[in-house]
Amino acid sequence: MTKPLENDLHQFFYDLHQHPELSNNEFETTQKIKKALDQHHIKVLDLPLKTGLVAEIGQGIPFIVLRGDIDALPIQEQVDVSYTSKNDGVMHACGHDFHATAMLGTAILLKEREHTLQGTVRIIFQAAEEVGTGALDVIRTGVLDQAEAVFGIHNDPTLVSGIIGCKEGALTAGVDRFAIRIQAKGTHAARPQDGNDPLIVVAHIIQVFQTIISRRISSDENAVVSLTQVHSGTTWNIIPDTAFLEGTVRSFNTQTRQLIENEIRQILKGIEQTFAVKIDLDWQAGPPSVTNDSIWSNFALQVAKESNLQYREVEKSPIGEDFSFYQEKVSGAFIMIGSGGPYPLHHPKFKIDTNIVFPSALYLSNLAESALGFLQKKRK
């Protein structure tokens, strides 16, 4: 079964890669996964999800959850492979096609040994991770209720292909997005005294924001405040009425996250009063930091060792990941799998080393089976 399954998974991966779908529009992807699960007589739960689905193998308690995401990104692919994306302007630049395929392989392997499983495994094929809403949609269905552990995966192009990486505590950053709109008073550039220049305000905001990390956050903490867009004006000789700024905050604990938001609000309030302008802040809180349970993160590395795979403790990363919402309900671990690089996630030349697909499925099936056995022993 091993070689035929490996070949089937590769073909499934190629197909997903060629037909990527954006967040909340993964209709064909969902149907392809469901069809593959049906072919192996794997139960799919009847849930009110627009896209994505949840498979179930085994029965009774304990029960654990595995999660892989399925959505793609609005990026034009530049990878020279035979299975490049056929959907113009859309590609799997984050490797969710690999995540979905690995989870499909896991489901098939677990189904083969279903009669020996000491509990239930639910596998989430999650939509809309890239927009940060998919995990919450799944949680609202109640599919995680009474679960005793949750595991998720993400490929990591900075790691050697196939290596399993994990760490206890914070692994990814909490993600916040902000948009700032400044209403001032435009005038002719030759008579600035007749107006109220929003670009002067922009300059102060940019400068003062950089002091939040350097002067308000302890050097023991990692955090980032990045301004990524500035728009104002229409021509060379007119001072505009308005300006717009946008950016992101990345942090690794709730206290730092709240402190940065408070500082930004206070800074903008002060600048608004100082320059007699109107400043509106649109603060969009995203997923919190992925924070791994110490027992389950060490367990994940131990299973990698027992599966004769390379493994290592990894550093935390400032990327965002909505898997953290699951961890607010159930303890567990988010696991990185080396995908070989050289291009980073979300790059138009990003590519998965397909040699990791089947070993990853085998590892995850071993992880699920071992976790059920571990929880069963705790009951005795």
Image: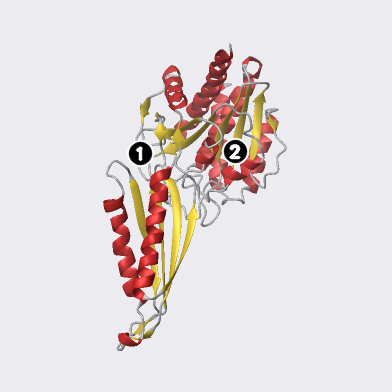
Amino acid type, mark 1: Thr
Residue at coordinates 34% horizontally, 69% vertically from top-left? Answer: 202
**Front in this rendered view, residue 121 or 285:** 285
Q: Quadrant of residue 298?
A: top left
Circle 1 Cα neighbour tier, 10 Å, few/some/many (<14 / 14–19 / ≥20)? some
Circle 2 Cα neighbour tier, 10 Å, few/some/many (<14 / 14–19 / ≥20)? many
Q: How many marks?
A: 2
**Lower position in the chain sequence, tag 1 or tag 2:** 2
Q: Position of residue 204 (x, y in %)?
A: 31, 67
User: The residue tagged with tag 2: helix, strand or loop?
Assistant: strand
Residue at coordinates 68% horizontally, 28% vertically from top-left? Answer: 42
Residue placed furthest toward the right: 46
Q: In the rendered image, which residue does mark 1 sit on?
A: 158
Answer yes or no: is residue 302 visible. yes
Q: How is the image coloured?
A: secondary structure
The quadrant of the rendering that contains the N terminus is top right
Marks 2 and 1: in contact by CB < 8 Å? no
Q: In the rendered image, which residue does mark 2 sit on?
A: 125
Q: Position of residue 265 (x, y in %)?
A: 41, 60
Residue at coordinates 65% horizontally, 48% vertically from top-left? Answer: 27
Q: Position of residue 22 (x, y in %)?
A: 56, 52
- 270 relative position to 356: left or right: left
The quadrant of the rendering that contains the C terminus is top right
Q: Position of residue 77 (x, y in %)?
A: 46, 52
Q: Residue 67 got which mark?
A: none
Amino acid type, mark 2: Phe
User: The residue tagged with tag 1: helix, strand or loop?
Assistant: loop
